[in-house]
Structures are given as structure tokens and as C-alpha cells.
Amino acid sequence: MFRKFHLSGLLFFKDMHDGSTRVVFQNEMGFTFFDFEWDQKDRFKVNQIIPQLNKQALIETLEKDMSLLLMKNLNTASETVWKQDNEVFHRFNLEKGIAYYITRQDQLVRIENAGKSKVTTITLSEREQHSELPSTIVFDHHKANFTIRLNKIDDAED
């Protein structure tokens, strides 16, 4: 039986004082769905996760998604670069597969993770003027047939 789930909340990315990086997903009331950490050497660990999400395959998928977005554990010595039409492709070998970081006009627009076929596409919307972050990031998992959509929340102006 196929179950359809929808989780809504806030995803926080934080560089910590000790050089580690934390990614925490909470609902609007502050209940934590998961808390992931990468130490200074980009080693991953789960600090907290709710039982419903505590599935090895799901944790590995989320770890890979966040690692790709944060550019963790990239083999920079393997990088190759080429231009195709108006896009520049940066190719990196991964432990399993290949990651492509695709830029247009010096802005990251897409990340593709591929093995023998495309596994995941991460699409970043254009940045708004005076903003370092895109307003939307969409993770499309081609083989697992699920999507994660992140929308940036702007600070309210008083």
C-alpha cells in the first residue's frame, strides 16, 4: 500500500562556532523532525530524528540531498568544467555517482546527481535582487518518485 505524506515546517541551516554545520527541520510550533550535523571534516551524524523518519534509506537520501546542497564531501581534485550553451557545468566524482553543479551567469541554477541515470535534480530559483539565497529550492528524486520543496521565508519588515 502506497502512503502519501506531507510535512510542513522550517528547515534551518547553521554554521556553528566549532566549524560544524547543522541542518534542523522543525514544524511551525518548534517540534523537531530531524537534526543533522556535519563536523569540521564533513563527517555526518544524526543528532535527533522522529521514529517515523528513522529509516536508513530515508536518512541516507536526506543526507545526500543536504550534502549536495551544502557541497559537503566533494572530491575537488576530480572537478572538470565545460560550457554548453549558456550554462557552465562543474562535474565532481562522488563516492557513488557523479554530481554536476550547473551555473548560468555565475549563479547556481541546478545540481544533478547521477549514477547510470539521473537520480536527483536540485533546482534553485533565480535570486532576487540583493539576496544571497534563492527563493525556492526543489529536490526532485527521479527513481524514488518524491519531491522536497523549500521556500525561503523573508524577514517581515515593520
Image (cartoon, rainbow, N blue to C red):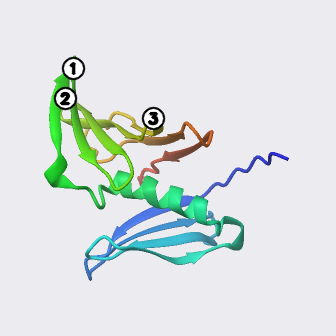
Q: Residue furthest top?
A: 85
Sequence-wise first label, 3 or 1: 1
**According to the image, label 3 marks what residue?**
118
Name the residue rendered at 36%, 52% in the picture.
68
Look at label 2 and name its amino acid: Gln
Q: Nearer the viewer, mark 3 or mark 1?
A: 3
**Would you say residue 13 is visible in this rendering?**
yes
Q: Residues within 10 Å of mark 1 (few under 14, many from 20)?
A: few
What residue is at 64 percent from the left and 66 percent from the top? 55
Element at label 3 = strand
Separation of residues labelled 3 and 1 (CA atoms): 21 Å
Q: Which residue is mark 1?
A: 86
Residue 158 visible, this orientation: no
The answer to whether 70 is drawn above or below residue 141 in the figure is below
Q: Report the residue marked by disc 2.
A: 105
Please provide percent x and percent y for residue 95. 34, 56
Classify the position of the C terminus by image quarter: bottom left
Q: Is residue 9 above or below residue 93?
A: below
Lateral position of residue 66 relative to residue 33, left or right: left
Q: CA distance from mark 1 to mark 2?
A: 8 Å
Which tag, 1 or 2, sits closer to the chain's start? 1
Tell me if mark 3 has few (under 14), some (14-19) or many (20+) residues whose alpha carbon lies within 10 angstroms of its own.
Answer: some
Question: Mark 2 falls on what kind of element?
Answer: loop
Tell me the element at label 1.
loop
The earlier-in-sequence mark between 3 and 2 is 2
Task: Residue 72: give its label.
Answer: none
Whether pointer 1 and pointer 2 mark residues with C-beta atoms closer than 8 Å, the reply is yes
Q: Give 76 or 47, whichever is nearer the viewer.
A: 76
